[in-house]
Each structure stands twice: as structure tokens, then as C-alpha cells.
Amino acid sequence: MNKQTIVGVIGAGTMGSGIAQVASASGHSVKIYDNSKAVLILARQNLVSSVDRLVGKQKISGEEGESIKGKIEWVNDLAKFADCGLVIEAIVENLDIKQKLFSELENIVGDDCILASNTSSLSITSIAAACRKPERVIGIHFFNPATLMPLVEIIKGLTTTSETESKTKKLIDSWNKTTVLAKDTPGFIVNRVARPYYGESIRIYEEGIADFATIDWALKEKGGFKMGPFELMDMIGNDVNYTVTETVWKQFFYDPRYKPSLTQKRLFEAGRFGKKSGQGYYDYSENVVVPEPKRDHTLAEKIFHRVIAMLINEAADALYYGVASKEDIDLAMTKGVNYPKGLLKWCDEIGAEKILSILSQLKEDYSEERYRPGVLLKKMVKEKKKFYS
Ligand SMILES: NC(=O)c1ccc[n+]([C@@H]2O[C@H](COP(=O)([O-])OP(=O)(O)OC[C@H]3O[C@@H](n4cnc5c(N)ncnc54)[C@H](O)[C@@H]3O)[C@@H](O)[C@H]2O)c1
């Protein structure tokens, strides 16, 4: 694959439109399809305004803007994808619908065309299972907004060949993205390792230890996170965030470590999705008094240490079970969710011994599997090792 490769994008929603813009800005001719004509028209208008805004702010030249817009063809017939060398699917997160689309696509595209899914939580292997040539099916997981977020996770399914993986990585690297390789496991890297940032913070709230504003403040103040967990969940959307949590939990055969919370489930049920619906953990209506955190530094340290210990435990487990390399796990969290540091590097700074003692204390206090320290973390402490030496 090279700049001459025609890139097909299926689904012109939030992710598909962004991916089409990225591919076009990288010099490809792009075809984008959506089964809703109305979405296709709206997506085209939005893309034109987004590119024009970039030109207006002088982020790109007028000529570049025209080229990005001109290289995208908005099509309403999948048969037009016949000459694509790469197709990226970004449709609804439903396995049956994705499988049906992939098997239909195989009758349209050539034998060398790589078929990719942008799925957040479905297994690539299960999508590939619907194909005659599963070896050319791969995960290319962009983050939202695709035009701005640098990270892309490349996921090789059980049946994907190494050749498909290396060709895909090479191409996406040429799009000025930071790629990481992830094993086909629930949540891949980011959507797995980040779970405790939300889950443990909600537990702290549910136990009455602190309110949303205080927990948000504590993690920003002591951890240097750009957004607190409740602000972030409200931005992502409690519908999206809850669904990812529930999917990861189910796919890990109901491992209690990933158990969703009732607090977030109720918000989801009530339609309190966050910023987009006007209310979530916080109220976004006009003239509302923003809740003030309790600026108690001792409490903040406790909150931070509990959450960071859970995050580091998850990152160490992902490394132990071969989800990705230590460098890619750290890169994924800084480039995909803006963490101030990679979690394994952070562990070296805080000390694995301290992290282990926090987890062991939590395990003793709660007698819950959720707090079990991972085997690698225990090994590191025993052998007095660091992740990076
Ligand atoms: N939104 C995110 O933050 C995010 C981030 C990373 C990955 N993803 C993944 O990307 C995919 C798309 O998510 P989104 O947020 O862009 O969704 P979206 O709802 O904004 O867009 C999906 C689009 O797919 C279209 N569609 C549905 N079924 C179709 C079909 N059979 N054929 C053609 N078009 C079809 C819909 O009309 C819609 O426009 C999902 O798999 C999601 O898990 C989402």
C-alpha cells in the first residue's frame, strides 16, 4: 500500500468522517459510504466546514484544503469500492452487522484489499471469521476525534497474517499517526488499561469518601491528569463509556476487576449522558453553580494513590499477558488518552513496592478480587526490578 492506494471508509458518522479526512489529508483518494443518505449529506457539509475552518485558522493552506475536499468521493453504492486497496469500517458497534458487511465487501473488492475495522470493543478475530480470506482482516483503532488524536492501535486477529499487519502499520505511520501494536483482547490497550480511572473513581464516590468535584480535583492536582474522571466521562458520554465498560467486563468472562458501576448505569438509563445531553455527573445548564472541590491534600493523596495503583496494576497485567510491549502500553496511554506519563514509567517513579502495598491493603480491606495484585507486579517487587532500568 502507498499514496496511490484508494482508501474506502464505511460509515460517515463521528469516526468515519474523521478517518476519511485523515486519509485524504495524507494524499489518498478516498471513497466514503454510509447506508443513510441523510448522514452522508450532513457528513459532507461538516467535513467541508471543518476543513474550511482549518484554512481560516491558517493551519493548512487553501490549496491543501481544496485537495482534502476534492479527494473524497461520497458514494451511495458499495460496488464503487471495487478498486480500493484498503477499506476501513466505522459503522455501528454490532458484530452481526459488521460480519454481514465484511462478507459482502469480499465480493466487491480485489483479493489484495485489506479490510479493517475501527471497532472499540469487538474481537477482530470474530469479525474476520465471517470472511473467506480472514488473513487480510485487521483492526485499525482510531481515537476520537480522529483528525486530532495521534494514537492508532493496530490489532492483529488470530487469523491475520504478519504481512497484513506490517503493511497496515507502515501505511498508518505514513499518515503521521503514532501506531501501537495490540493483541486481540478485550479493549485492546487503551480501553482496557484506562478502565480503573473511571471505575475506581466511581467506587470512591459510592463509598462516600469524596464527591465528584473533589475526586476530579484530586487526580488533576496530585496526578497531573488533564481532566478528572467525572469530567472525562461526561465528555466521552456516559452511554459510550458505560457500554465499553460493560463490554470489556463481559468479554473477560465477568472478571470482577472490570465490573461496571450502578452509579453510571443509572445515569445511562436516565439519559444523563454528560455534556451532550446537558447533564451527567455534572449539570451543564446555564447559570448553574459549579460545585467546588474540598481541597484537602491528605484526602487527595489517598484518592490519587488508590486510582493510580489500580491503573498501574492493569498496565502491568496487560504487559504480562502480552497485550503489547511496555513501550507501546505507555505510548498508548499518553497519546490515546493524554495521560501525563506512561503508567509503567510512573510505576518506576512511585515504586512497585508502594503500588503493591496499596493494592494488598485494598484487597485485605475489601476481600474483593477486584484488588488482586497482578503476578508481574509481585514479581517486580520480589526481584527489586523496574520496568525501565
Ligand atoms: N465514537 C468514538 O469515540 C469511537 C472511538 C473509537 C472507535 N469507535 C468505533 O467506531 C465505530 C463507529 O463509531 P461512531 O462513533 O463513528 O458511530 P456513529 O454512530 O457516529 O456512526 C456510525 C455510522 O454508521 C452508519 N451505518 C450503520 N450501519 C451501517 C451499515 N450496515 N452500512 C453502512 N453504514 C452503516 C450509520 O448510519 C452511522 O452514520 C464503532 O465501531 C465504534 O465502536 C468509536
Image (cartoon, helix red, strand yellow):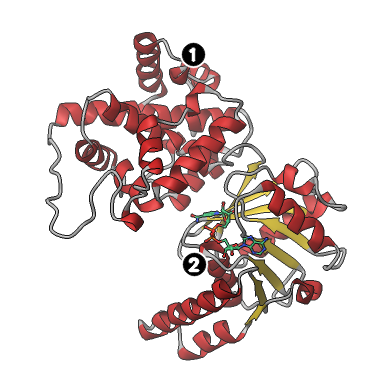
| Circle 1: residue type | Lys
Residue 279 point in image, percent of width and height:
28, 50
Q: Residues within 10 Å of mark 2 (few under 14, many from 20)?
A: some
Residue 299 point in image, percent of width and height:
18, 27
Residue sticking out furthest to the front? 270
User: Which quarter of the rendered picture does the N terminus lie within?
Assistant: bottom right
- Rendering quarter of residue 312: top left
Instruction: Residue at 47%, 58% (x, y): give it.
Output: 144
Residue on which disc 1 sits: 382
Residue 388 lies left or right of residue 11; in this view the side is left
How many numbered marks have been drawn onto this rendered protein structure?
2
Nearer to us in this view, 328 or 200: 200
Residue on which disc 2 sits: 147
Ligand 1 - quadrant of the structure image = bottom right
Instruction: Residue at 62%, 59% (x, y): give it.
Output: 91
- Rendering quarter of residue 376: top right
User: What's the distance in space between the residues labelled 2 and 1, CA to CA?
Assistant: 44 Å
Residue 366 point in image, percent of width and height:
37, 12
Mark 1 element type: helix
Instruction: Residue at 73%, 77% (x, y): give it.
Output: 4
Q: Is residue 226 above or below residue 208?
A: below
Q: Residues within 10 Å of mark 1 (few under 14, many from 20)?
A: few
Nearer to us in this view, 137 or 127: 127
- Residue 79's label in the rendered image is none
Instruction: Give the mark, 2 or 1, whose residue is nearer the N terminus.
Output: 2
| Circle 2: residue type | Thr
- Rendering quarter of residue 345: top left
Residue 75 lies left or right of residue 16; in this view the side is right
From where the camera sits, is residue 228 visible?
no
Instruction: Residue at 33%, 50% (x, y): give it.
Output: 274
Mark 2 element type: loop
Q: Is residue 194 above or below residue 79?
A: above
